[in-house]
Image: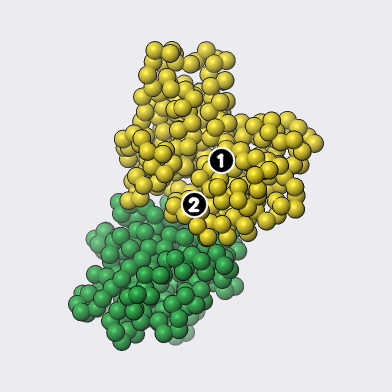
Chain colours: A yellow, B green
Amino acid sequence: MTGSIGIFDSGIGGLTVFKALRAVLPNESLIYLGDTARVPYGTKSAETVVKYSLECAKFLVQRDIKALVVACNTSSAYSLPALNKELGVEVIGVIQPGARMALLRSKTGHIGVIGTPATIASNAYARAIKEIEPKARVISQACPLFVPLVEEGWLDNEVAFGTAKIYLESFKNEKIDTLILGCTHYPLLKPVIGKVLGAEVSLIDSACAVADSVKDELGRQNLLAGSSHKGKYQIYVTDMAARFETVAHRFLGGDVPSVKRVEL
Amino acid sequence: MTGSIGIFDSGIGGLTVFKALRAVLPNESLIYLGDTARVPYGTKSAETVVKYSLECAKFLVQRDIKALVVACNTSSAYSLPALNKELGVEVIGVIQPGARMALLRSKTGHIGVIGTPATIASNAYARAIKEIEPKARVISQACPLFVPLVEEGWLDNEVAFGTAKIYLESFKNEKIDTLILGCTHYPLLKPVIGKVLGAEVSLIDSACAVADSVKDELGRQNLLAGSSHKGKYQIYVTDMAARFETVAHRFLGGDVPSVKRVEL
């Protein structure tokens, strides 16, 4: 089946989802759009997040995609109903896959969630978890400084550690055994988060969870590309800032496809 | 002379300029626009900053303003030529007033500048300083984490102190005696910056500098409101995020006029 998988994110953090999809589905072609001109979404209102998400999605739908992956947690938390209503294509967000993976991993059912202020305010992870397992206990914490820390590349210095200590303090009393990293930037802070919470807390990376979900969903609908097909990659951004290449390399671990700037 | 003073900023940091103008020119009516839907500008490209700045300015020009104050340092660094060309109104940015005040204050002519990545990349402060005093020595440093720190309200904890120590380290060897706080958010970090650099370094707040410049400029052009006129205040934002009120209070020190959301 031809047609690409479209992926959008508020910025370039969603490249972690791009990277996971490229690894899990090497035959699929991927088109990524990062709304870098208006990043971040995570500090903005639901109304603005939905409006921007629809604009991103429409750009991708015009490019012959067979499925749309919403890599941004904030956008997934608010925009899925609008996207499902307005687009004639399969839409997959990161919240459901992350919630399912956390429940698979947790033994005690005490699950922590960290995310942007908007994602946490939406309560979307807690709802998704409790829909599957009503007895689960979900504790949430917004971590607004984690995104700028990652973009600055301060992943394991004393500022990163001090910030993580303040945000994650409350989880220690709650005895969680699983923590959902509910923002595409956060997996880069795994070492520091692990140091604060200890090795007994499993860290759930939604990027990996969503890649498996996309594979399952496309398989179920007979939409997977044939094994002889070689995936092609396109990356679009709405603003090309000076630090783009540096930060993109940080997320993709090298191997960055060529990038085009577009207006939405 | 009727007509308001228009002020725009990438977000709500420019309320420090609003506050300074309200204090210095109590007879003037002020209209403020914060582009909170697309904040921040300081990590974006020159092209995008100019485009957004023109959209903000046009919104204000339609509202019968006699002068336009560009409260955002990043926007002042890139957009003044375009704004001067396209608008038929006096445009005043924060860079020139800040540079002049720094030169008045400095004894050694060794001046530090901190700002967003875009402001520092523009080199606008160094150019403005050297145009007035070619012998001055200007040392610049981008501080991308200072804005999110202020928005989080972490103004004097150990994370704020650790961040300031890393960013300001280089100034210690350069023996500066004056530091320009080249971003509307930074004055809220004065205590921490002062602790790192010591009391012998003067901190220049562009918000105060620009308010004096506006008064001089309007006086020179005979555009000041009469002393019987009572200033009225309007605040517009492009997105109304949940934390808006909290952060606005932090910048204005209480006394926040009613706020309307608009689309540009």
Q: Is residue B111 left or right of residue A9?
A: left
User: Does residue A109 show up?
Assistant: yes
Can I make out residue B224 in this image?
no
Pick the residue in front: A152 or B72: A152
Residue B201 position in % (x across, y down)? 40, 81
**Residue B223 against residue B12 in the figure, above or below:** below
Distance of label 2 from label 1 (alpha carbons) = 20 Å
Please state the horizontal and vertical placement of residue A76, each as a whole percent of the image. Answer: 57, 37
State left or right for residue B82 relative to residue A97.
left
Q: Residue B219: x, y in percent?
A: 33, 82
Quadrant showing the N terminus of chain A: top left
Q: Which quarter shows the C terminus of chain A? A: top left
Task: Give x and y (percent) for residue A42.
Answer: 54, 48
Q: Secondary structure at mark 1?
A: helix
* Quarter of the rendering containing residue A47: top right
Q: Residue at x 64, y 32 (%)?
A: A101
User: Camera-side residue: B198 or B253?
Assistant: B198
Identify which amino acid the numbered label 1 is placed on: Asn
Q: Which of the two discs, 2 and 1, sits closer to the camera?
A: 2
Subunit under mark 1: A
Please name whichever residue, B158 or B46, is drawn nearer the observer in this view of the structure: B158
Q: Classify mark 2: helix, strand or loop.
A: loop
Residue lying at the far right of the rendered structure: A135
- Residue B180 in which image quadrant: bottom left
Q: Residues within 10 Å of mark 2 (few under 14, many from 20)?
A: many
Residue neighbourhood size for the residue with mark 1, other residues' Cα within 10 Å, grouped as few (<14), some (14–19), many (≥20): many
Say which mark, if any, is on residue A155: 2
What mark, if any, has residue A233 been given in the picture?
Answer: none
Chain under callout 2: A
> A174 or B32: which is nearer to us?
A174
Q: Which residue is mark 1?
A: A73
- Residue for point 71% across, 42% down: A177
